[in-house]
Image: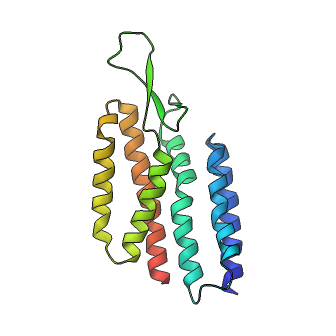
């Protein structure tokens, strides 16, 4: 019976995430939101007790974060940010003498987001929540050189906090249902 409830919840959330991805003009984020649905179907009968619930919450925390963060960034930042070809944003090149020359920063943010949310939920589930500080430090140090423009700093801070808040909420729910 628990399996059916998890499947229904996963389908409803996948639909919502797909709509959020389309509203933020990033339709490629809609496809990964179906992964929890396929995972729930594929693992039918394998997990006992609340295992389905913990697995579903973990998948939800990792995968659902991208459309949620994209929606929060759209609501929180100005519409003047132009998206780059590789998932980053285009900012004016301050070192270039050419007018209106821009370069892409914060590339790979969606992939980094998946990894940070997975790491956060994993550290909480294994009883090491202090390791979240290490995750945040590694991300900050890795992105430091790209944070010259105010637009990049704003998106980095808002995106990171939204991603970590979502993952933290899901990690708490998974830990409490374990």
Q: Is residue 135 left or right of residue 78?
A: left
Q: Nearer the viewer, residue 32 or 5?
A: 32
Q: Is residue 53 left or right of residue 103?
A: right
171 is higher (above) or lower (below) than 51: above
Q: Nearer the viewer, residue 75 or 117?
A: 117
Q: How many marks?
A: 0
Name the quarter where the N terminus is drawn: bottom right
Residue 32 percent coordinates (x, y): 62, 56
- Residue at 70%, 66% in the rendered image: 11
- Residue at 66%, 85% in the rendered image: 2
57 is higher (above) or lower (below) than 111: below
Furthest residue toward top: 98
17 is higher (above) or lower (below) than 102: below
Q: Quadrant of residue 142?
A: top left
Residue 36 percent coordinates (x, y): 63, 67
Its colouring scheme is rainbow
Q: Quadrant of residue 125?
A: bottom left
Furthest residue toward bottom: 49
Residue 69 percent coordinates (x, y): 51, 50
- Residue at 43%, 73% in the rendered image: 172
Q: Nearer the viewer, residue 42 or 169?
A: 42
């Amino acid at each position: 019976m628990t399996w059916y409830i998890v499947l229904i919840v996963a389908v409803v959330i996948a639909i919502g995430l797909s709509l959020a991805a389309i509203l933020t003009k990033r339709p490629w984020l809609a496809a990964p939101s179906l992964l929890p649905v396929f995972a729930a179907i594929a693992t039918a009968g394998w997990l006992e007790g609340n295992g389905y619930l913990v697995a579903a919450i973990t998948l939800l925390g990792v995968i659902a974060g991208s459309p949620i963060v994209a929606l929060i960034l759209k609501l929180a930042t100005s519409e003047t940010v132009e998206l780059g070809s590789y998932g980053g944003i285009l900012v004016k090149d301050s070192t270039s003498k050419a007018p209106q020359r821009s370069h892409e920063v914060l590339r790979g943010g969606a992939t980094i987001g998946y990894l940070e949310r997975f790491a956060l939920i994993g550290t909480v589930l294994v009883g090491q929540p202090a390791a979240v500080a290490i995750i945040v430090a590694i991300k900050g140090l890795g992105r430091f050189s790209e944070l010259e423009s105010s637009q990049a700093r704003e998106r980095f801070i808002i995106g990171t906090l939204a991603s970590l808040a979502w993952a933290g909420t899901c990690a708490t729910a998974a830990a409490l249902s374990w």
